[in-house]
Amino acid sequence: KAGVTQTPRYLIKTRGQQVTLSCSPISGHRSVSWYQQTPGQGLQFLFEYFSETQRNKGNFPGRFSGRQFSNSRSEMNVSTLELGDSALYLCASSLPSDTGELFFGEGSRLTVL
Amino acid sequence: AQSVAQPEDQVNVAEGNPLTVKCTYSVSGNPYLFWYVQYPNRGLQFLLKYITGDNLVKGSYGFEAEFNKSQTSFHLKKPSALVSDSALYFCAVRDTGGYQKVTFGIGTKLQVIP
């Protein structure tokens, strides 16, 4: 069974630009979560989607948005990039159960210059 | 609000010695607790979880964790460390009672010295 796939793996943007990251979950997983990982902050929860609906949202500004499609694939978008947005963005999928573990992709490493 | 604390930024242990990576948590209800490991430039991999039942949970690669409700702790342990265990370890908690988000600790870097 294929794992969680994130694209692109690496990207470089400049301040003010926008970026879209993609995540394809494991087949059969309908829940997709996004996390931002930085060395000083650890993993910060961005949002979680289930059946195309956002169920939970973290404390990030409105520049961070996401969506989920009917095939469970998810995208997140960051507009008006700032230097502080440089991070590893991790996507995780899971079965629709609160006892289930998360399955992570390799991440998309964003560098903002 | 739920939270997780990993009090040690880094743990150093000699190969062959037992290792412990500490984690304490705070939730309003009963916790679902998880440990994940991250190798350089990779995503996180699930190691083990506590949902209910036996306080000692066994997981992948010889790791185990002990749930202590009175101390609100969930420490990760391994009887004999390997150099290949060197990685970043994350403790995580999910509160029961609905589709709550998973909250992660800041991570502990484990360095196993040959």
Image (spheres, coloured by chain):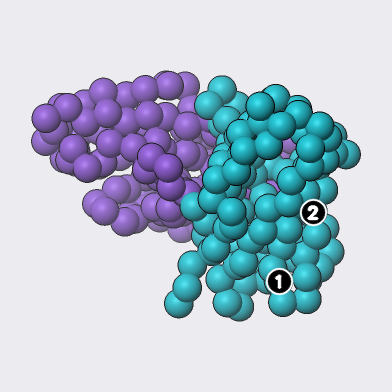
Q: In this rendered view, identify the residue nearer to me: A37 or B82.
A: A37
Q: Which mark is residue A72?
A: 1
Q: From the viewer's perspective, is B38 left or right of A51?
A: left
Question: How far is disc 2 from disc 1 in space, using C-alphas?
Answer: 12 Å
Q: Residue at x 56, y 22 (%)?
A: A40
In this view of the protein, can residue B48 be seen by the observer? yes
Three-letter code, disc 2: Gly
Q: From the viewer's perspective, is A95 left or right of A39?
A: right
Q: Residue at x 45, y 77 (%)?
A: A1
Q: Is residue B102 above or below residue A12?
A: below
Q: Residue at x 42, y 21 (%)?
A: B8
Q: Which mark is residue A52?
A: none
Q: In this rendered view, identify the residue nearer to me: B82 or B23.
A: B82
Quadrant assignment for the C terminus of chain A = top right
In this view of the protein, can residue B93 be seen by the observer? no
Residue at disc 2, secondary structure: strand
Q: Residues within 10 Å of mark 1 (few under 14, many from 20)?
A: many
Q: In this rendered view, identify the residue nearer to me: B75 or B111.
A: B111
In contact (CB < 8 Å): disc 2 and disc 1: no
Q: Colour of chain B?
A: purple
Q: Is residue A21 above or below residue B39?
A: below
Residue B110 at x, y = what percent? 32, 31
Residue A66 at x, y = what percent? 79, 53
Q: In this rendered view, identify the residue nearer to me: A22 or B113.
A: A22
* Chain identifier of the residue bearing label 2 in the image: A
Q: Residue at x 52, y 56 (%)?
A: A105
* Chain identifier of the residue bearing label 1 in the image: A
Query: Disc 2 marks which residue?
Result: A66
Residue B13 at x, y = what percent? 21, 26
Give me the chain that's cyan: A
